[in-house]
Every structure is written in C-alpha cells, then in structure tokens.
Amino acid sequence: MFNTKWLSKKEIENLILEPLTEDEILACRKKHSLVPFLDEIVKGTTEPGTGGTAYFHFLNREEPILDCTSQAWSLNLGHAPADVNYAVAVQSQYSNHVRYGYLTPIRVKLVNKLASIAPGQLKDGRVALNNLGGGGAVEAAIRLAYVNSRSGDQIVTFFRGYHGSSLALTGATQQLGLAIRYRPFGIDRWLKTFFPYCYRCPWGYKGGLGGKKDPDCKLECLEFVKQHIEQYHISGVAAVLIEPNQGAGGQIPAPVEFLIGLKKICKKNKIVLIYDECQTGFGRSGKMWISEYYSDLANEDVSPDILAATKGAAGGFPLGITLAKPKLKMLSEAEEHSTYSSNPALMAASLITIEILEKNKIPENAAKQGAKISKFLNELKEKYPQIGDVRGPGLFIGVEFVKDPESREPNNELVAKFLSSALKNNILFGKSMPILKKSGEMMRNIVKIKPPLIISDEDTEEICFRFEKSLKDALEK
Ligand SMILES: Cc1ncc(COP(=O)(O)O)c(C=O)c1O
C-alpha cells in the first residue's frame, strides 16, 4: 500500500518495534517524563494485524490480560481493531492533515452519517467534529449553548460529574481540590447541583437499587435541583450539562423520572439541555446512545438539545463529536476550530467504526453480554454482603463494594485488594474517581466493568469467573 521515501520499511519497523532496554525505561520514567505512569507497560494486542480483541499484553508478562476497562472505556471494538486500522491506512495514503476550515470527502461522509444516527430530536441535526476528544466536544457544546441562549451565562453541572481536564472543564468536573494543585479557571461559571445517587439518597429512601429510584420516592431531589436552577444562580443559567449515567463518578444512573423532569425544567426556563455521552455513546449502554435507552424507558423522547460524545467513536483514535438539534444557530469559524481537528484518517476510523457497530449489531451484543454479567453479579450479591449494588445498563456496569449492606459504608480497602487480585488473575477492572475529604476520608469503592463491546459468550463467562475468583481471593487476604 505504501512505498516509503526516506527510510526503508525495515528501518521504520525496527525503530518502532525494537525491544526496550531497562535503561531506556528508567530514563523515561525517572528522568524525562513530566507525568507519572502506572507500574505496568502496555505492549498491546496479542494478535498483531488481526486485532479487535478484549485481550492485550503487558510487557514482560506471559499471560494475556482480559481488559474490562477498554483503556479508559474507549476501545469499543477491542484492541487494535484491524478494520479500523486498515481504514486509517487507506485514508492516510491521501492526506494526514488539512486545515479545519476545509471540507474533505471523508468529513462530508462522517458528518452526514452522524446526523443520520443521532438520537431523538438530534436526528438530522448539525454536527461539529474535533480531534481533541471529549473535553473538546463538551466545550463546543457549551459554546453552542451560549450562542443559542439568552437566559444567562452559568452552566449547571452535577456532583460527582466528569467532563474533562482542561483549565475550564476542571471547574465543570467534580472538584478534586485535594488532588489538583491549582484552581480551575472561570469557577463562577459553574453552578454545581445535586445528582440523583439513589443508592445513597440523602432523603433516606433505601430502595434505590440498580439505578432505579425507590418506589416511594417523590423526586425531592428534582425539586431541589429545580429551585437551584430557577432561584439560586448568580447570573442566570444558559445550560444544564449532565451525564445521564455518570461514569467516572461511579457508574451512577439517573433514574429516568429525573431526566424527564429535568428536560421539562429546561424547556420551561428556556435553558439548553446538554447530555455528556462521552462514555455512554457508540453502543456501550446496549443502544447506540444512552439517550435512546432512556427514551425507551420513559416511553417518550428524553434526548437533549445538544450532545457531546467521544470514546468508542473511532476504534480508539481521538474524535470528539458535538451533535445539535436542527434549529439551533450554528457556531462561527472563530467559535469552533483547532489545528488538528480535521484529521481525515481519524474520520475514516470513525466512519468505519460506525459501519461495524451497525452492521454487526455490536450495541445489541453489549446489551446481551451486559445482561448476562449483571445477572451473574446480582446472584453474587446474594452470596456476598460486600456487594451493595450492581448497576448497568449494557456493558456500562458498576459494582459498589460496602462494609455491610445495612450501613452501606464504602469499602475502599476491599476494592483495592480486589483489583490487585484481579490483576493476578489476568483481568483488569477500573474503579470510581476518588471523592476526597480533608479529613483524609475517601470514597473509591465502585468497581467498573466496561470491556470492549465485541466480547463473546466465552469472554463473558471468563469475566464472571475471574470476578468471583478475585473477590474470593481479596476476601481471604
Ligand atoms: C463523561 C465524560 N466527559 C468528558 C470526558 C473528557 O474526555 P477527554 O478526556 O477525551 O477530554 C470524559 C473522559 O473520561 C468523560 O468520561
């Protein structure tokens, strides 16, 4: 496919693939890198050139690791999916980079495709693309909300939310004041309010399990949020930005009734509703979008005015996507652009990823395998009182570990032991973002199970088997 010009193919392969020495690793870790790294080094897929697998290798470890993190929940098609990589090669024969202002054939195809698969009221609407990822998509959504709203300049975000790590978005994200050593910019722009965490309901309802509200709950939290939005802002509210099912914060689904009510509050007050589907888009919930999952539950359209997406959009390559409903005013050239955000190869990766998701019914597979894992975990919950709550949907699963089911006290210690046992059992799980208190107390007790969506029946059985084994091992420690 390629004839190289300046170096031979062998030279290129050697430079990239030559094994590392211990000295090289040490120089990078201890001397040159400005950021810290985890202990293990990721080598990559076990099947170079074929790819699309849930397994990968750490350097210097014999056994392949079953990846229930999809590497920050992004590899929906697995490690090194060959079809996507082929698409990148095909497109990059022609160009690597064009200026943001130019259309390219692949951009035409991708923008139209995304508009056609957008959920609910976003269908056939408008699309902005970037290669910065989720933060870029969320920021474009907020800029678009400002362009379309006259009701103020504050943005409502929620406790335990995660929207990105840029200087602006660290303000939108759950405040990690003890972990980040500087103050986010524009903190007065954000109005932080309560997220409906039904398992830990401050109104005392105890039956909020599995992401559903307690049957007796009267949505007191929604009334609280309504008052906050309508009465307790500083300079008016332009938009509400919410993850319908929080990822980093701990796999916490908003009950559908909350989202129905929130949409009504936004409509009544002419506030733009933005869903952050950076984690939940592209099939992870068992539907292409979690907006569709919730609309089915609600039996009405609960899709937002604007939606931000990224992970899973392009087989692991960076693409940020902002979807808007048809009648919104557009962003100007000055309001949305960045040098690298029109990368044709990465857009090809996304077009082919979407084709694979649709043609091979990958979201349906996520629903099927996710239901099996959740059923298994709910049965395990009956055996192990340390499992407090199991939440989905699809392959967007959280397991909340507690000291006992009555007090629901977070069991951080067990999660730490469980994750290290899991690695010994050659399986990688994630854990929730830390919620820190000045006293040193911390909440980090939710295990995340978010493998690639292409997992087979056998992979699912392995996940269940290794989960239980790791839990038993952790409890024996
Ligand atoms: C819900 C959500 N929004 C936004 C982001 C930010 O995406 P990125 O890290 O690509 O900027 C993330 C990343 O984890 C996320 O989970």
Image: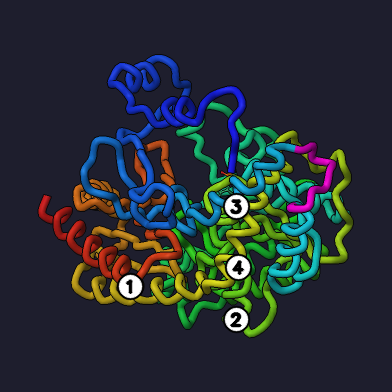
As drawn, 134 above or below 381? above
- The residue indicated by pointer 1 is 457
Quarter of the picture holding the N terminus: top right
- What SS does tag 2 mark? helix
x 71%, y 66%: residue:
304
Amino acid type at image mark 3: Ala
For label 4, count other residues whose C-alpha is less than 10 Å away and answer few (under 14), some (14-19) or many (20+): many
| Span colored in magenta | 98-106
Q: Which badge, 1 or 4, comes first in the chain's sequence?
A: 4
Asked if ligand 1 lies within 8 A of label 2, the reply is no
Amino acid type at image mark 4: Trp
Q: Which badge, 4 or 3, comes first in the chain's sequence?
A: 3
Q: Position of residue 379 (x, y in %)?
A: 26, 76
- Marks 2 and 1 sit apart, C-alpha to C-alpha, by 26 Å
Q: Position of residue 142 (x, y in %)?
A: 74, 49
As drawn, 384 above or below 277? below
Report if the CB atoms under discs 3 and 2 are less than 8 Å apart.
no
- The residue indicated by pointer 4 is 289
Q: Left or right of 93: which side holds 282?
A: left
For label 1, count other residues whose C-alpha is less than 10 Å away and answer few (under 14), some (14-19) or many (20+): few
